[in-house]
């Protein structure tokens, strides 16, 4: 996936699922890592990171 596609997909996931989308992306990456699908897991980690950047810093 290209960088632009990753950011578009990350934005769509955040809009559709809200903050829980980040946890879902992380879980997808973990599941894929356990199955040995390392390249796909890497893509999900990248999507997770993109969503974290979009979300911005934590508010307390």
Image: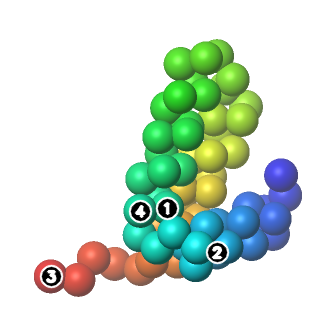
For the point 71% across and 35% down, the residue is: 40
**Contact, mark 1 vs mark 2 (Cβ under 8 Å):** no
Left/right of residue 30 with respect to residue 8 in the rendered view: left
Q: Element type at marker 2?
A: helix
Q: CA distance from mark 1 to mark 4?
A: 4 Å
> Which residue is denoted by mark 1 in the rendering?
21
Q: Is residue 19 above or below residue 37?
A: below
> Which residue is denoted by mark 4 in the rendering?
20
**Which label belongs to residue 60?**
3
- Whichever of callouts 4 and 3 sits on the residue coming sooner in the sequence is 4
**Contact, mark 1 vs mark 4 (Cβ under 8 Å):** yes
Q: CA distance from mark 1 to mark 2?
A: 10 Å
In the image shown, does 16 or 32 lie closer to the viewer?
16
In the image shown, does 3 or 26 lie closer to the viewer?
26
- Whichever of callouts 2 and 3 sits on the residue coming sooner in the sequence is 2
Mark 2 is surrounded, within 10 Å at the Cα level, by few (under 14), some (14 to 19) or many (20 or more) other residues, namely: some
**Contact, mark 2 vs mark 3 (Cβ under 8 Å):** no
Left/right of residue 47 with respect to residue 21 in the rendered view: right
Q: CA distance from mark 4 to mark 3?
A: 18 Å
Q: CA distance from mark 1 to mark 3?
A: 20 Å
Mark 4 is surrounded, within 10 Å at the Cα level, by few (under 14), some (14 to 19) or many (20 or more) other residues, namely: few
**Contact, mark 4 vs mark 3 (Cβ under 8 Å):** no
> Which residue is denoted by mark 2 in the rendering?
11
Q: CA distance from mark 2 to mark 3?
A: 23 Å
Q: Is residue 28 above or below residue 20?
A: above
């Amino acid at each position: 996936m290209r960088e632009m596609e990753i950011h578009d997909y990350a934005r769509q996931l955040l809009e559709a699922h809200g903050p829980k989308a980040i946890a879902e992306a992380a879980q997808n990456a973990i599941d894929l890592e356990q199955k040995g699908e390392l390249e796909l897991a890497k893509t999900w980690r990248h999507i997770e990171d993109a969503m974290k950047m979009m979300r911005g810093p934590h508010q307390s």
